[in-house]
Image (cartoon, helix red, strand yellow):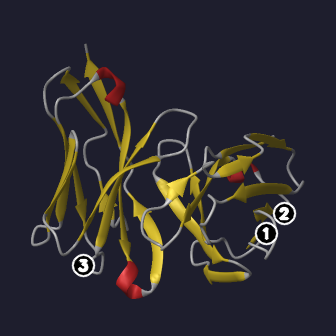
Amino acid sequence: DQQVKQNSPSLSVQEGRISILNCDYTNSMFDYFLWYKKYPAEGPTFLISISSIKDKNEDGRFTVFLNKSAKHLSLHIVPSQPGDSAVYFCAASAAQGGSEKLVFGKGTKLTVNP
Amino acid sequence: NAGVMQNPRHLVRRRGQEARLRCSPMKGHSHVYWYRQLPEEGLKFMVYLQKENIIDESGMPKERFSAEFPKEGPSILRIQQVVRGDSAAYFCASSRTGDEQYFGPGTRLTVT
């Protein structure tokens, strides 16, 4: 029972273009969403988060959009750079439920080609 | 401000031995989480601790696994009588308020 789904295992984008990574969730109790970036043999690095009371959060080249009715969020990276090549994980938590554990998707491997 | 520290980075154990994984949270963080990542999978929650308390252990296997976060010193994830299926990357994360969690570099456990 996968509560957080990243249906694209991989994505390839040209440098300078927009990267769009998608994530769907099934648990309506989730109220906080995060994106992490991970390089091989390293721990995940926090990128950006969004609370369920918002529909957009922006930080530099990274923007996260949340569509609660569709239970869908996306991460936009613009412009994409070769250094952005990594695995991106979407994660969700139901803090209102009293536990702050994160539920992760399986990740999307982004390759940005020079 | 040092990040989350984990040691060892790599650990090799024979079947039946014990594995101890250590995690020092970021300074000022009192919430610690342990996650496990199997190959080609996302991270799976194991346990959430605050100082001297286990808050949520719903992701911990019922047997052989235990975790603690004592008043002094690092958090410890202990796996007794390891089996090959325990081979994975184990990540520790910490947070101040329970929102953004910051991860350590992980411990890669190999059971031979």
Dots 2 and 1 on the same chain: yes
- Residue B77 higher or lower than A40, as above or below: below
Give the residue number, with chain letter if any, for mark 3.
A28
In space, the residues marked 2 and 3 are separated at their CA atoms by: 37 Å
Question: Element under label 3?
Answer: loop
Mark 1 vs mark 3: in front = 3
Coordinates of residue A98 in the picture (x, y in percent): 45, 86
Neighbor class of circle 3 (other Cα within 10 Å; few <14, some 14-19, many 20+) is few
Coordinates of residue B99 in the picture (x, y in percent): 42, 69
- Which amino acid, by three-letter code, is at mark 3? Ser
In the image, what residue occupies the spot 25% across and 13% down? A114
Which of B39 and B106 lies nearest the eye of the viewer? B106
Quarter of the image for residue A20 reads: top left
Give the residue number, with chain letter if any, for mark 2.
B80
Left or right for B47, reference A6: right
**Residue furthest to the top:** A114
Question: Element under label 1?
Answer: loop
**Residue furthest to the front:** B1
- Residue B22 higher or lower than A76, as above or below: below
Q: Are marks 2 and 3 in contact (CB under 8 Å)?
A: no
